[in-house]
Image (cartoon, coloured by chain):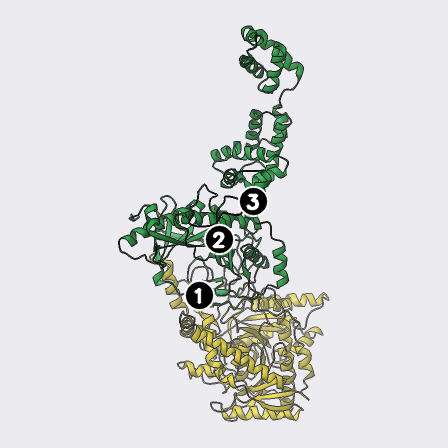
Amino acid sequence: MDLTRMTAAELSGALAAREVSAAEVTRAHLDRIAAVDGRVRAFLHVAADSALAQAADVDGRRGSGEPLGPLAGVPVAVKDVFTTIGMPTTCGSRILQGWHPPYDATITRRLRQAGAIILGKTNMDEFAMGSSTENSAYGPSRNPWDLARIPGGSSGGSAAAVAAYEAPLAVGTDTGGSIRQPAAVCGIVGTKPTYGGSSRYGVVAFASSLDTPGPFGRTVLDTALLHEAISGHDPCDSTSIDAAVPPVVAAAREADVSGMRIGVVTELSGEGYQPGVLSRFAEAVELLESLGAKVTEVSCPHFRYALPAYYLIAPSECSSNLARFDAMRYGLRVGDDGTRDAEEVMALTREAGFGAEVKRRIILGTYALSSGYYDAYYGKAQQVRTLIIRDFDAAFGQVDVLVSPATPTTAFPIGERADDPMAMYLADLCTIPSDLAGNAAISVPCGLAPEDGLPVGLQVMAPVLADDRLYRVAAAAEAAFAGRWGRPLLAQAKGL
Amino acid sequence: MTTETLVPFAEATGRYEPVIGLETHVELGTRTKMFCGCTTTFGAEPNSQVCPVCLGLPGSLPVVNRMAIEYTIRIGLALNCTIATWCRFARKNYFYPDMPKNFQISQYDEPLCTDGYLDVPIDRHGNDGSAAYGPRAEGGSTRTVRVGIERVHLEEDTGKSLHVGGVTGRIHGAEYSLVDYNRAGIPLVEIVTKPVAGTGAAAPDVARAYVTELRDLVRALGVSDVRMEEGSLRCDVNTSLSPRGSGRWGTRTETKNVNSLRSVERAVRFEIERQAAVLDAGGRVIQETRHLHEDSGTTTSGRSKEEAQDYRYFPEPDLVPVAPPAEWVAQIRASLPEAPSVRRARLQAEWDLSDLDMAALSNADALDLVAETVAAGASPADARKWWLGELARGANAAGLELSALAITPAQVARVAELVSTGTLNDRLAREVIDAVLAGAGTPDEVVANRGLAVVSDEAALAAAVEAAIAANPEVAAKVRDGKVAAAGPLIGAVVRATGGQADATRVRQLILDRLS
């Protein structure tokens, strides 16, 4: 039995039945990381010692009869944007190289309390800005389907780790699609929960009004288990919603779409979409209809303005959020040779510590918030955001969920869009509307594009706090596809 | 330091009409900081009251302190403001090493409280006022000026920089700087007045009186200890001049961090004299921030506002909007204490004091102390006498505020009681007070330990009287002959013989009885 091929749910069952120990499960995954991560480069930091210590602790507690949750002893990979005591947190940036945070993010703490084994920190686009991990100061991660291609981003390391069987589960963050897009191009499941449904405390901020932590898994049920474990109200995050976590695990188990009203978003298809993506998406819709869902087409006319609005709001917030990296209290410090004042050291440090994309967005955002430009840029973008929320509200008045392709194309080759920011930004075309509206969305594999044999993601979007609907639809599609494919999609990945 | 040309104050205000405006920062006395659970004790070991949130560590998030919102609403209501039903915090972006996030969470176009006023008595400090402004308050001779309040908003304080190695203590010329983040994140309320015009030569007094009244109000509200010397109340003073009759307002300067009542007055006065000289010479006042030098009472140029920073305000996305429910605001309103001006009028009537006596109490900051002493049982006259007399001298000699003396109003009331019951005379009472101030215990303990009570043992007194008469036969003869005024030496001898503890009035009576 290869423990790394098991799902989190299977591992959970085997651990509870004491068929395997957490130490064995952890060691198997550490061995897998050692074997393949030199090629995948999903991890920035592997915490082997603390993972094994955590596993021993879980085994001890289980041995003494302590009741443990479903994730106790199940390994998880953590995006390097979450603060972690005992491990560095770099956000893929030079400016935070070697920073060891003195506190755990709420989600880190919840994972530890659930007994999940934190294997290490995964690679990401610097400060979560990007769609390929090519913006990481520590080099790109690779797509396990084709090591010459990007694993998506910004949570590309987390997605690659799960797709490469280095971890059954991973957490990431989604600001413009940074969970769903890498999940789609790596052929796994990834969810952006409702904004405020999962705590941002200890998540190094990119764009505060958009950042949403969420789960990755190879199956819909696994993703739901992690979703449930990391969610719920957090008094340390003012924007955290004080409400019960939607019943995502139950919905994933029910996997029933009969009678559900599903809307296909007109605006999220057509020109610019890869033909194989559109054909697999069309098949997925037909499949859902064959399972008893009522499918209609729904228009969301303002979605076409979502990308430009996003690229004003997110950079504006980031220009302010990233101001704190000034060499004064932590992180990189450049030029402090006794001849320069604080301002010069700040400038030199930021010049050396930030990569090109981060600088581009800081400059964009600083400009958009400037006196005299605020109304035309940031103010206008916020109005667009309101219109997009209204589009969703109108759509959800007619249907229970909306569907679209998760990305316009499959994974592109590393380097292809590195010098073309606009082309890179288009990778998030389908995912950005849900971020702007703060509602919930998932990407679940719906097959391989015929022209390149690479995975395609089906995106399902649900209203605020109706995250359970995502799992109901995704699990139904997953089950139906499994019957059709005869084996898990990932079994066809040729990269490793 | 540059020497400025100045126009004498009377001339300046003769030719120009000053317009002033004040921005006052009050550190709230909440137990914990604005956005985290760190404590706010003043004077703690540097960087000992910090956490990931107030240090702005990556990933940390603010959560609003509800008590700070309540305190701000209290201030807003006491200043007759409208309380917002929905408002947001905003980020004010600029780089400075003592600001952990390089933005300050503040409020911009949606302040919590707007559009109020404060009625300020302007002759509390001995200024006789000018008939040009302000009606006399009803039933009294105190003139008041109504100062409009533009806004009251809530923000977080910054850390504190200490520049080491320079001459001035400013960053310019310093060898290095230290930053203490204990203050970072302490809730700070900013109270901004509308422009105050038409006060003429009284403008400096109005500025001072406004800050004094505001300080008393905030203290009465119990939301801050408002100690200017500890920086929990800080003022920026705006001043501009317009040629009399021109109808145009001049360009204003902003004098920063004016940290005593006296400095508020001096800052306005100096700027009037300086700007008048600039305008007289045909020059133009530059819109800029200026620094007040406490030693000389002069101001010098800081950074120019004409190349002003763009703070790129935008709504704080890490915080949900503040929407105080109407019932909560009503509850806070119902719990407001009596306004200081109303209280002063009431106490003045109750104590039957003249305006001058009342002004003296206010000037000495003795109003609360006298009120507490009266509440503890002393008569208003006795309470006033002790606080403005012996205790004021003691405070002066020690360089302390009256309220910082090591004696409580209840103890002062006890001393007054001991005098009125005849246990102490005035001289002994002063001795008891000195001992209490020196830490020798309560008045009763001092009296008991030092045996200071007046000797009222008639037999002992009678013996002393006999001895005094025997020792001074000539004096005794004069008194016998009806020269009552000649009894002084006999009284003195008796008082000396009892170690000062005899009551002189009683001794005099005994001597006259014996020699009649």
Q: Which residue is mark 3?
A: B345
| Residue B20 percent coordinates (x, y) | 41, 54
What residue did someone put label 1 on?
Answer: A323
Under mark 2, the amino acid is: Arg
User: In this rendering, is residue B433 above or below A118?
Assistant: above
Q: Measure the C-alpha gap from mark 1 to mark 3.
A: 52 Å
Residue at 66% in and 67% down: A58
Q: Are marks 2 and 1 in contact (CB under 8 Å)?
A: no
- Of residues B177 and B95, the one drawn nearer to the viewer in this rendering: B95
Few, some or many C-alpha atoms within 10 Å of disc 3 (few <14, some 14-19, many ≥20)?
A: some
Q: What residue is shown with label 2?
A: B146
Secondary structure type for disc 2: strand
Mark 1 chain: A
- Residue A131 drawn above or below residue B269: below
- Label 1 or label 3, whichever lies nearer to me, is 3
Hey, which quadrant is residue A367 in on the image? bottom left
Q: Residue, x 58% and y 14% (percent of image)?
A: B494
Determine the image quadrant of residue B35. bottom right
Q: Is residue B153 above or below residue A398?
A: above
Relative to A487, B404 lies left or right: left
User: Viewer-nearest of labels 2 and 1?
Assistant: 2
* Residue kind at label 3, given as amino acid type: Ala
| Along the viewing direction, whichever of A422 and A335 lies nearer the viewer | A422
The residue marked by circle 2 belongs to what chain?
Answer: B
Contact between marks 1 and 3 (CB within 8 A): the answer is no
**Residue B499 visible, this angle:** yes
- Please provide percent x and percent y for residue A376: 43, 75
